[in-house]
Image: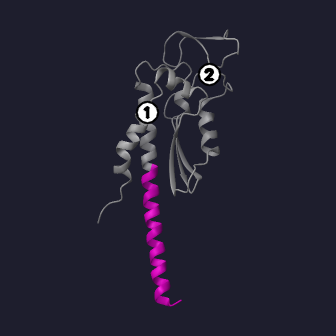
Amino acid sequence: MSATKAQILRAIDDYREKIIDEVEKRCRNYCENLIWWAIRYRKTAFDAHDFTGNLLNSIVVCLYKNRQPLTAFFAAGKVPKAIQVKMSTDGRGRKRYYFQPDYSGENTGFRADKATDEGWGENDARIFFNSFTPKGKNLFDIVVAYPVEYAEWVEELRGTTGILNTYAEAQRVGVTLLRLPQK
């Protein structure tokens, strides 16, 4: 290979790396914005109520590069910690939880309808980030997750997780945030 060709190939590789670094930086910024939107939409959803705080603390925005975990942005640490482990059904429908006050600051009672591991939502988020593998062969993947066992149930029954608004926000601002500057 001629020296000139080697220099051209090296210059192309250097330029490619600069572009990838810039895209990664923009993806990180985008993910950080998304976690704040996800928190906001959960907290402001009409009729949303947090009994323990585990659903809110489980929200995570993950960034993967070549299907490998790169970084994650957790709601936990940005919102107050959950006040107790996740509620769980006893299988007979008799187990009832009482809070004075609950995570939302109200005196309430609740009968859990879903079985859980009775762990912490924050731990579910960390486990999700480290164990999930995106499908496909994208250079970067961004995943928004609400990994507690009852998140889908809450969304289907009450529509208060905020995930649909978060996805809409992601689509709205994603194109702008990730666009490379034109020269």
Give the residue pinned by disc 2. Answer: 84
Q: Amino acid at mark 2?
A: Gln
Image coords of residue 105 (percent x, y): 48, 15
* Residue at 58% across, 53% down: 67
Q: Residues within 10 Å of mark 1 (few under 14, many from 20)?
A: some
Report if residue 72 is visible in the image. Answer: yes
Report if residue 81 is visible in the image. Answer: no
SS at badge 1: helix
Based on the picture, tell me whether residue 5 belongs to the magenta stretch. Answer: yes
> What are the residue bounds of the magenta stretch?
1-28
Select label 1 or label 2 by which is in front.
1
Vertical arrangement, residue 121 with respect to residue 70, above or below: above
Q: Residues within 10 Å of mark 2 (few under 14, many from 20)?
A: some
Residue 15 shown left or right of residue 58 in the figure: left
Q: Residue furthest left?
A: 183
Figure quadrant of residue 66: bottom right
Vertical arrangement, residue 28 with respect to residue 49, above or below: below
Tell me which label, 1 or 2, sits earlier in the chain.
2
Q: CA distance from mark 1 to mark 2?
A: 27 Å
Magenta stretch: dominant SS? helix
Based on the picture, tell me whether residue 68 belongs to the magenta stretch. Answer: no
Give the residue pinned by disc 1. Answer: 164
Q: Amino acid at mark 1?
A: Leu
Split into 4 quadrants, where in the image is the C terminus?
bottom left
* Residue at 42% across, 47% down: 30
Image coords of residue 113 (percent x, y): 61, 17
* Residue at 54% across, 31% down: 57
